[in-house]
Amino acid sequence: MTDRNRHRLWFETPAPRWLASLPVGNGRLGATVFGRVYKETMIFNEDSVWTRWPDDRHNPDALKALPEVRRLLMSGRIEEAHTLAELSMFGTPHRQASYQVLGDMTLLFGGHHEELVTGYRRALDLDDGIASVEYELDGVHFKREVFASVPDDVVVLRFEASAQGMIELGSHYYRRYDAFERIEGNDHVAGGAIGARGTRFHTRARVLADGGAVEVLGDHISVREADAVTIIVGAATDFASDDPEAACVEALSSAAARSYEELRARHVADHRPPMRRVRLELRGPADAELEVLPTDERLHRVVAGGLDPGLVSLHFQFGRYLLLGSSRPGTQPANLQGIWNDSYQPAWDSKFTININTQMNYWPAEVANLPECHLPLFDLIDRLRVTGARTAEVHYGCGGYVAHHNTDLWADTATLDNVFCGLWPAGAAWLAHHLWERYAFDLDEAFLRERAYPGMKEAARFVLDFMVEDPETGELLFGPSLSPEAQYRDSNGLRSGLCMSPAGDTQIIRGLFERCLEAATILGIDDEFAAEVAATLPHLPAMRIGSRGELQEWREDYAEWEPGHRHVSHLFAVYPDAQITLRSTPELAAAARRALELRIDAVSDRPHGGWSVAWLSLLWARLHEGAEAHEQLIRVLRKSTDLSLLDLSPPGGTNPLTVFQIDGNLGAVAAVCEMLVQSHDGIELLPALPPEWPSGSVSGLRLRGAFEVDIAWHDGRLQHARVRSTAGAPCVLRSSEPLVISRVGAGVAVVEEDGLIRFDTEPGAVFEISPHQHPPRTEAEPE
């Protein structure tokens, strides 16, 4: 692939719709670029622009109804349980807040028309984090650049020409609802409140011209005969600032005091290092001509059945770019759309959907070497511990904290929606998995002690208090609950969702309990609590195998209402957890494989969102099925990806794929990582390498145990790898073939037994790995 296109999305036409536009973001502020020639449109976002419902949606009737709903469920009277729960166990109202667009800007370029320009190119440089538009008109080269700066906390637009005095534009900034608009000097100003209770916001766009004349015409700022123009956009809300106007003006004025060249250099210096931590090159049987095609043409070829490993690499880095652009330390976590949203009523309110989607957003954070992007999720968990404690007490009479299938900017934890999706009290327990994963990847005991373990313990406290004993089996059951968004046919053939201890919940709880025990042992604390958890573990329901040989989704061997359902929560134990592995639980692994086959066979042509298909790819990778993992990954590109490589999700029913959801992009990143290396049960190199990627290399992936790895392969076989230890933990490799291990600059004592290769490490130590028939490499990096 040419250097120019290796890390660029590029197109020869403007975006035909918002879904095809190009995003920039600094975690808090985002913008999307259409690249139109005559009348450009820019849509801006700020991560705390949300509506708000009443502060307290809690419903004390939920606790009153809880015993009867459980009794009805456990006696098989499921329809009655549904009705009672729907009436009494939900927050009031049944809804949460919604994320909204910040505002729009139009830029009018008189005399510039798509039909008149030549050499048009719209691009997004992932390495620099800059969106650009270039074209020629009457012998003059025009260029626009847009980026969202972390160091200066603004969005910057730049307009240049190859000849002096050639920049002429008119700018207009507006917000359709809940805002005033005015012009103050060279500033577009807008502010207001998001509905009756939402955040108050203030935003400004300052127009700075190099030469020429600037004047106000109506509600536009007009620039004529300028050599260049810079527009700087800032925004703030009262969620993080007592005076959003002052905060916005301060950031904007500070940025405006710098030259464009300095703003750009500061942005690039911040953006490049994290993007360059991971390099991926996939070399397959693709034609060399693919390397010079525009991104949309490459995607069209893949949709038509072609292969393009280079496009997979680009899609992978684009996913990392999206996470870096929507989740930075001190910002809000990535919501359903990251931060990029063009709507005042986005699908599913663009909330934090914590029965899979928010978690999937962060599956690549550690392994794809963007660990700082994980921090906003931990900030949200800290806030959920406060609000969720109140919900646990009022709705369930329990200690600890609880969260359900959605939350919002305000960390709302009360139940919402309906009994087929909303009465799912395992959200906090699933989020706690991410606290442990952070520790597993960096072995930071201070983080485990001060942040991870308290969050895990409080989530476990709720579970311990909430469970009830099945008088017939002695099992401790968790419920009422459901298998997220999936339904079954009850004994009367009716569509049902509520149940006790669906498989996914039990797997989440078992994983949480086991991690709490391990953490308490590492930290040497909480013997009494650990004893309670240890005594409870044997009484959790065991995983069951159904009549078709599949891992059951419910305790009973129910038939699915929708056999090809998009959620596969009952396979949580395969991925993201690792309670089921090919080595340790072969019978359950076979049952999980069968469940996966049945789910995929039933999908048919019904469109699934990219997130769902990415999860299927991850599951196949964990089962070491590279061809199947690749098939699902390519489905993400073929069925659920727009021209911009943004992931798509169906808005419900059989509607076409028209909604952007970032989780599919980020789940695909995690799937690529999982095909190339796994570390949940020792380190395995190339455990699910697809035949479509016969040769390639990757560098900078992070592994559990605080390691980083570089890998190169050729003709489907490992050439060499390099493992770097960051914490000095012992290293365990799994390999079915003999490997040669050497330490760079020193010796290494290796113990081999039953396919395991063990050796001690020190912080900073580097180890070379190669197949037994090849000598180890000594160069700095794999090719």
Image (cartoon, rainbow, N blue to C red):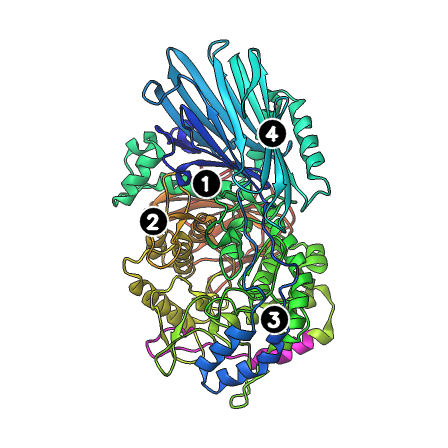
CA gap, disc 2 and disc 4? 48 Å
What residue is drawn where x is 72% and y is 64%?
Answer: 523
* Secondary structure category for the residue under label 3: helix
Q: CA distance from mark 3 to mark 1?
A: 36 Å
Position of 140 compared to 302: left or right?
right
Instruction: Give the mark, 3 or 2, whose residue is nearer the N terminus.
Output: 3
Q: Which residue is under mark 4? A: 182
Specify which label sits upstream in the sequence, 3 or 1.
Answer: 1
Check the image and name the residue furthest to the front: 218
Any part of residue 269 in sight: no
Tag 2 residue: 634
> Residue at the spot x=55%, y=56% of the render?
750
Residue 755 versus residue 73 in the image, above or below: above
Disc 2 to disc 1: CB gap under 8 Å: no
The three-letter code of the residue at mark 2 reads Ile
Span of residues in magenta: 530-553
Three-letter amino acid code at disc 3?
Answer: Phe
